[in-house]
Amino acid sequence: MLSIHDLHVRVAEAEIIKGLTLDLPAGEVHAIMGPNGAGKSTLAYALAGRPGYEVTSGSATYDGEDLLAMTPDQRSAKGVFLSFQYPLELPGVPGLTFLRTALNAQRKARGEDEIAAPAFLKLAREKAAALKIEFDMLRRPLNVGFSGGEKKRMEIFQMSLFSPRLLILDETDSGLDIDALRVVADGVNAARAPDRAMLVITHYQRLLDYIRPDRVHVLAAGRIAASGGPDLAHELEREGYDKYSKVPA
Amino acid sequence: MAAVKQTVDQVEALEAYKHGFVTTLDQEFAPKGLNADTVRFISAKKDEPDWMLQWRLEAFERWLALEEPHWAKIHHAPIDYQDSYYYAAPKTKAGPMSLDDVDPEVLATYAKLGIPLREQEVLAGVQGAPKYAVDAVFDSVSVVTTFKAELAKVGVIFCSMSEAIREHGDLVRQYLGSVVPVSDNYFACLNSAVFSDGSFVYVPPGVRCPMELSTYFRINAAESGQFERTLIIADKGAYVSYLEGCTAPMRDENQLHAAVVELIALDDAEIKYSTVQNWYPGDAQGKGGIYNFVTKRGDCRGDRSKVSWTQVETGSAITWKYPSCILRGDGSSGEFYSIAVTNNRQQADTGTKMIHLGRDTRSRIISKGISAGGSSNTYRGLVSAHPKAANARNFTQCDSLLIGKSCAAHTVPYIEARNATARLEHEATTTRLSEEQLFYVMQRGLSQEDAVALLVNGFVREVLQELPMEFAVEAQKLVAISLEGSVG
Ligand SMILES: Nc1ncnc2c1ncn2[C@@H]1O[C@H](COP(=O)(O)OP(=O)(O)OP(=O)(O)O)[C@@H](O)[C@H]1O
Ligand SMILES: [Mg+2]
């Protein structure tokens, strides 16, 4: 579903991703772990098309198409969803207004009909209830004054509303209490499907206990330094990243 | 941040001004230039009584002695007041007209602007939709006022200024110039001498005006200025909501618009005045566009009276305007809600004055300035509490949003508290539209243009909510259009 080959990404004149290759087949969940500053968020941003994250060489193919040639909104319409490590606040933009505008923009780009307000509200209510989100929270400007955990929960809520096909979760588990972690993990597990793939960036084994990843990759110094099964995560938890940090420049 | 530079620094030509067409028709002009005879010509054209002519001539004398002000943060080449027409009107018979007498080209113009002038059409519109009475001013004359008969049934007078001077001379004489004195300032004084048309509203005691009143100003003629004059009186306990809209063709020359609006609210009366100003702003290089030098003032003359200004300023090459409230009556209140958008080479110096004279007076100022391109946007405001204004309260919030790197925003608040019990609060913020926010919104599926519009609408939401529903939707679109091409 997603195939990244020898990707190089430059941010503000510095090369951060230095030849990264990764294959993510449909139906699978892959975890990405790695030390702070390794380039995990940079990879996520590059895949979502953030301006300023310049791909200098390499490729990323999504469903047979050149992902890197698309604008961020085109990627979104094609089902790419990024749950941000630090979700943004949108002053004056009520959550529901934002989500409906976004959903309809995606649908329009796919040539689908717009969803009418009543149908949208029904959908939003269902999804909010499933994630134990107070509906009134959705009437407030998106993320403004929300706690760190609430913002993360909103990201998962958006994800479940849009039903994307390529899900990139950037440390969605950081800052969550145990209950919220469960809710998020349940959300992710419920989203598992044969035609969906997920890239889960995390620092903690805890999340991976709930979401059994098909594969675990270590991202260090801008490259995949090691890959393995779920056991690799346990090993990292015990031994840390020391042996991966001496990657030649 | 190469991409930031790339996206933000390019400001494309503003192609979005969709009201820029010219209507071709037979027009009548005053001789070019300005002297006492021009003033006499205008007065005669309007069949005015002698007191009105004398009032104008006196204003003209005073204007000659005044100098153009230069304290605002705006720059323009000197204006040649002799190189302009002070009166332009479609050639038709004088006096109030029925729609059948109006030049079809003029009617077509309003149709093109989406303003219904036939009452049947308004009535035939969506059921349950609010009804609006319209006064249509084309260059120097009012061409038609709708729903006059229906309004007259409850005693509301809504007509053109010219008609009011002829038909309701006593009211006009009593109130004209009582809020904005003839020699208040250079442009108001000029207006007093040569004002052409505008709207007149009188709402009798205890009457709640049964519909929204609105005036649409259209400048059509080349090399002409527009000097309209509006006077609104809400008698004791009356209420009226009034909206003003304006557009002009795209022309390479700068055209002067110097209006005066006076509002008078007596005891317990309330006037809500909204403006959606969309004069032609000039092109991306700053060629052409309207100079909008306007004096608007509301007098809360009665106790517990209220005047509320809401403005959405997107057009004009230069905007110089400070809708103000004189809080004379005890317990009176004034509000000012403003959205000012500047793009390309536009300059705006706008704000308000809240003059607290009476006891327990309150005022509230919410100003949202958005600057993009190479434009300059200044909020200038005065809040003053006089010695007798015990317990005066003011709250001011001024927010500026910058889009791109070559625009500028300034906030110039003046505060004078001459009463120890007055409490005047001022808050101000300046933010730049962040690329990270834009990316977040685009990641959720919105195009860059829609993302900008969404974030900007969030920024101005508090003010949009003050506009009548239908105009809020219109204004929201207008703000988005004005900023088209400001990013990317
Ligand atoms: N705009 C920028 N300007 C300069 N350096 C940047 C910029 N953005 C990212 N970097 C650098 O790129 C490197 C990778 O950052 P990235 O955010 O991808 O790390 P990460 O693996 O997600 O780390 P964490 O686990 O802390 O979230 C860091 O050294 C960071 O300082
Ligand atoms: Mg990160």
Image: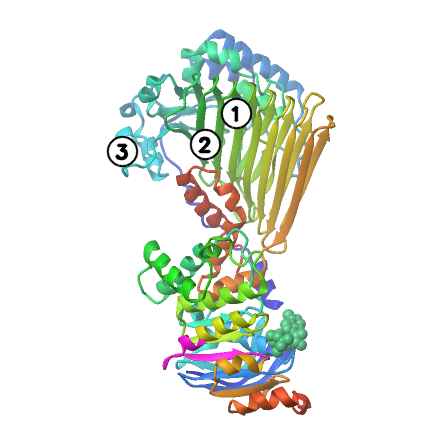
Q: Residue at x 39, y 82 (%)?
A: A64
Position of residue A242 in the picture relative to residue A57 (left or right): right
Badge 3 and badge 2 in a common chain: yes
Q: Which residue is mark 3?
A: B121
Position of residue B19 in the picture relative to residue A8 (left or right): left
Amino acid under disc 2? Glu
Asked if residue A201 is among those painted magenta in the image, a careful observer would answer yes
Q: Earlier in the sequence, mark 3 or mark 2?
A: 3
Q: Secondary structure at mark 3?
A: helix
> Residue A61: x, y in percent?
44, 81
Q: Which residue is mark 2?
A: B244
The answer to whether residue B90 is visible is no
Question: Label 2 neighbourhood size at 10 Å, few (<14), some (14-19), many (20+)?
Answer: some
Q: Residue at x 52, y 64 (%)?
A: B440
> Residue B473: x, y in percent?
42, 44
Quadrant in which the C terminus of chain A is drawn: bottom right
* 3D distance between C-alphas at marks 2 and 1: 11 Å
Q: Earlier in the sequence, mark 1 or mark 3?
A: 3
Amino acid under disc 3? Glu
Quadrant in which the N terminus of chain A is drawn: bottom left
